[in-house]
Image: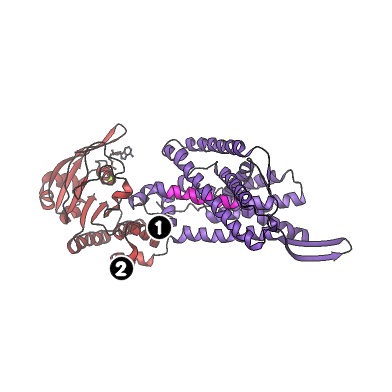
Chain colours: A red, B purple
């Protein structure tokens, strides 16, 4: 039961969920529901006020953030957080800071294959990329860490529909081919639930509904609240 | 003309020393957004360590070139190591506990630390100036002209050559570290977005410590150069040189490494030329006036970061 307070504001009121290896799990919820807060709390920044975070059987609730991120967990955070005065290449290298550098070329090749756009822009500074390009870079940077667990906070934000589809295809492919475990926060609930094995709905810092992606998609409450206009 | 050239050489020498100190200000500011006012005193401590080691080794100008060079390298290593330890401890004890508190807290602490270091050296080493007999002597005549008005020569002394070359080499090494190594990338990452850096597995605290250590090491080099060049030091030199170097860092664009170098050079040149052509008393006024003028027209400093970016 994770709880988190920002001062007096309680952002997480007791969240409990499991993510199993090889799964895609998605979290949907309105603005301010606490999705990003949960993502960041998993990484230890901010620290959970109470409760436990168990990863691969180990309690990581009090492990420093930079050490958590060295355990095959990578995050593409809310707001992308690209280093503005570093080139695309350097941003990607930062992603690879936690892995050994022997397969660097291979990892670059993989990211550039997924996002050819980044290859063209290799020497451009992160701060001057377009929003969508920055999003690709944020995901690419997370992949450079060779994670086993990938945390994605609204990867489709601000992207053209075609690129959104491309990114969801990439997530699916990584999951199926490489067994990558994905924990996904999305506003784009339709795509996310279609893709995910499991989904959870967060309201005001607590989970109100859980189920397989298909189950949630079928639910009237979910459709009404999160798929308005987005359902096809 | 000869007079001008001579002052140019002197100015570049002085500017090199300022530039070396300015790097410490600029790197620390870049990474934690704080002016480390005690940095000038680390420079002072560095020069005292150099003096103590030189005295202990008993080298003099008569020791012979080979011995002097070997000994000075040893002195440099000692000064860099011990000053780095000071820089590291300073960050650990005085600044890290205040990280996350209000902005003025570390600034005030820095001023306090500066006073502590000055008093500590004053008590440990005495308040009077400490002289050092010249160790590196000699020089080269670059130009010579004789006419009815007399003889004009332009000289560059061996110590000036040493200072300028050492500075250039260190600048090169440091720029490479910052631009090309994973340590340098980590430093720049912490500078631009500390939270993201830690999300990428960077140990932010350690990176900040390393930055203090690097700045202190360069200040120690400047301390040794200052000692060899001027031959006298006291517990207060860190204040004056520190303020100048800080000015240089702001002038060049605080946070910018090449800016710190350029700023150091500009301040060194202004000071030297002002003393040479106008008056020695007002050389500091000239340097600070230059700072004010530049900041009015270029608030970012000469090589400050451009603010065009989307985040
Ligand atoms: N640093 C902070 N200090 C205080 N309150 C915060 C802070 N960060 C988030 N909050 C609050 O915590 C709540 C949850 O925020 P969070 O960012 O987790 O929402 P979210 O579900 O990711 O929303 P969105 O879909 O808009 O990204 C919000 O009410 C927010 O205002
Ligand atoms: Mg969010």
Which element is circle 1 on?
helix
Label 1 sits on residue:
A126
Assess whether mark 2 and mark 1 are in contact (beta carbons under 8 angstroms).
Answer: no
Does the segment drawn in magenta span residue B280?
no
Q: Nearer the viewer, residue B249 or B84?
A: B84
Q: Nearer the viewer, residue B14 or B162?
A: B162
Q: Which residues are magenta?
A: B207-222
Q: Nearer the viewer, residue B258 or B77?
A: B77
Q: Residues within 10 Å of mark 2 (few under 14, many from 20)?
A: few
Q: Quadrant of the N terminus of chain B?
A: bottom right
Q: Position of residue A85 (x, y in %)?
A: 44, 56
Q: Position of residue B141 (x, y in %)?
A: 75, 64
- Going 14% across and 43% down the picture, which residue do you hit? A209
- The quarter holding residue B13 reads bottom right
* Left or right of residue B93, residue A51 in this image: left
Q: Position of residue B172 (x, y in %)?
A: 54, 61
Label 2 sits on residue:
A106
Does the segment drawn in magenta span residue B220?
yes
Callout 2: residue from which chain? A
Q: Nearer the viewer, residue A20 or A219?
A: A20
In the displayed structure, B198 sits above or below A105; it is: above
């Amino acid at each position: 039961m994770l709880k988190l307070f920002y001062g007096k504001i309680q952002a997480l009121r007791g969240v409990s969920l499991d993510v199993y290896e090889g799964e895609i799990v998605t979290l949907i919820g309105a603005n301010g529901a606490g999705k990003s807060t949960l993502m960041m709390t998993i990484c230890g920044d901010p620290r959970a006020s109470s409760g436990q975070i168990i990863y691969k059987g180990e309690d990581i609730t009090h492990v420093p953030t930079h050490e958590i991120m060295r355990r095959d967990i990578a995050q593409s955070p809310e707001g992308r957080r690209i280093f503005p005065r570093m080139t695309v290449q350097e941003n990607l290298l930062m992603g690879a800071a936690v892995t050994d550098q022997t397969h660097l070329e291979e990892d670059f090749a993989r990211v550039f294959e997924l996002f050819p756009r980044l290859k063209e822009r290799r020497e451009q500074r992160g701060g001057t990329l377009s929003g969508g390009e920055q999003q690709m870079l944020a995901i690419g940077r997370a992949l450079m860490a060779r994670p086993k667990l990938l945390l994605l906070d609204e990867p489709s934000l601000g992207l053209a529909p075609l690129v959104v589809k491309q990114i969801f295809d990439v997530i699916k492919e990584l999951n199926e081919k490489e067994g990558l475990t994905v924990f996904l926060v999305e506003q784009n609930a339709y795509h996310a639930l279609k893709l995910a094995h499991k989904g959870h709905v967060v309201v005001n810092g607590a989970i109100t509904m859980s189920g397989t992606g298909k189950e949630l998609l079928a639910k009237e409450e979910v459709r009404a609240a999160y798929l308005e206009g987005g359902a096809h | 003309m000869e007079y001008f050239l001579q002052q140019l050489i002197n100015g570049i020498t002085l500017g090199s020393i300022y530039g070396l100190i300015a790097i410490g200000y600029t790197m620390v500011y870049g990474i934690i957004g704080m002016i480390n006012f005690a940095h000038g005193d680390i420079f002072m401590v560095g020069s005292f360590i150099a003096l103590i080691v030189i005295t202990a080794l008993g080298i003099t100008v008569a020791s012979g070139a080979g011995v002097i060079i070997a000994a000075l390298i040893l002195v440099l290593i000692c000064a860099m190591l011990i000053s780095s330890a000071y820089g590291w401890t300073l960050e650990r004890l005085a600044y890290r506990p205040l990280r996350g508190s209000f902005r003025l807290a570390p600034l005030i602490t820095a001023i306090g630390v500066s006073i502590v270091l000055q008093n500590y050296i004053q008590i440990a080493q005495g308040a009077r100036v400490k002289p050092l007999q010249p160790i590196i002597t000699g020089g080269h005549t670059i130009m010579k002209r004789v006419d009815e008005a007399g003889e004009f020569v332009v000289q560059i002394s061996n110590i000036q050559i040493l200072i300028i070359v050492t500075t250039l080499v260190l600048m090169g090494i440091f720029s490479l570290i910052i631009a090309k190594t994973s340590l340098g990338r980590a430093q720049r990452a912490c500078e631009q977005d500390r939270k993201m850096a830690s999300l990428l597995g960077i140990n932010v605290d350690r990176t900040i410590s390393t930055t203090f250590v690097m700045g202190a090491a360069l200040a120690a080099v400047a301390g040794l150069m200052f000692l060899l060049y001027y031959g006298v030091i006291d517990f207060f030199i860190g204040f004056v040189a520190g303020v100048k170097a800080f000015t240089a860092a702001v002038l060049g664009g605080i946070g910018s490494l090449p800016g710190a170098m350029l700023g150091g050079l500009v301040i060194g040149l202004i000071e030297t030329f002002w003393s040479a052509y106008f008056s020695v008393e007002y050389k500091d006024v000239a340097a600070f006036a230059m700072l004010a003028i530049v900041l009015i027209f270029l608030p970012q400093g000469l090589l400050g970061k451009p603010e065009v970016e989307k985040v």
